[in-house]
Amino acid sequence: MITTTTPTLDGHRVREYLGIVTGEAILGANIVKDIFASVRDIVGGRSGAYEESLRTAREEALREMATEARARGADAVVGVDLDYEVLGAGNGMLMVSASGTAVALE
């Protein structure tokens, strides 16, 4: 499945627009990651644990979006947008949502 943030695909013509498709992933942060992130905040540096959680959530949201597009008979998803939010009590959940337009190509 071709996915792109651009509204068109060079070298391809859209035959049919099949509608908006979405994918979401919500992951909970765990206490061990929170403790290490707090230490990172104090001493500086990057939080590999949170970066990995963010990467995993993004990949899952994109995978879910592509699955929905395939179910509609799409060859590609154009105009993909990714959004990131924190949710829940104490902002303990991370949500990544992906959306785009499913298209059938000529």
Image: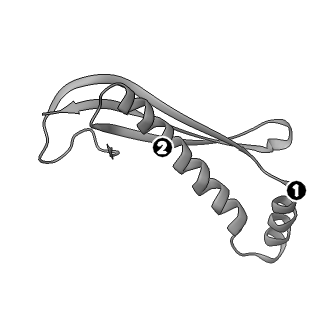
- Count of labels in the image: 2
Asked if residue 82 can be seen in this view, the reply is no
In this picture, residue 101 sits left or right of residue 93: left
Which three-letter amino acid code belongs to the residue tagged 1? Answer: Ile
**Residue closest to the eye, 92 or 23:** 23
Asked if residue 97 can be seen in this view, the reply is yes
> Residues under labels 1 and 2: Cα distance?
27 Å
Q: Identify the secondary structure beneath mark 1.
A: helix
Q: How is the image coloured?
A: one colour
Residue found 72% across the figure and 64% down from its top: 49
Q: Identify the secondary structure beneath mark 2.
A: helix
Q: Position of residue 100 (x, y in %)?
A: 39, 34
In this picture, residue 60 sits left or right of residue 67: right
Where, quadrant-wise, is the C terminus in this rendering?
top left
Image quarter of residue 46: bottom right
Which three-letter amino acid code belongs to the residue tagged 2? Answer: Leu
Q: Position of residue 96 (x, y in %)?
A: 59, 42
In this picture, residue 31 sits left or right of residue 97: right
Q: In the rendering, which numbered label is found on residue 62?
A: 2
Tag 2 or tag 1, which sits nearer the N-term? 1
Q: Residues within 10 Å of mark 2 (few under 14, many from 20)?
A: many
Residue found 39% across the figure and 40% down from its top: 80
Residue found 64% across the figure and 62% down from its top: 51
Q: Which residue is mark 1?
A: 31
Q: Position of residue 71 (x, y in %)?
A: 38, 27
Residue found 86% across the figure and 62% down from its top: 32
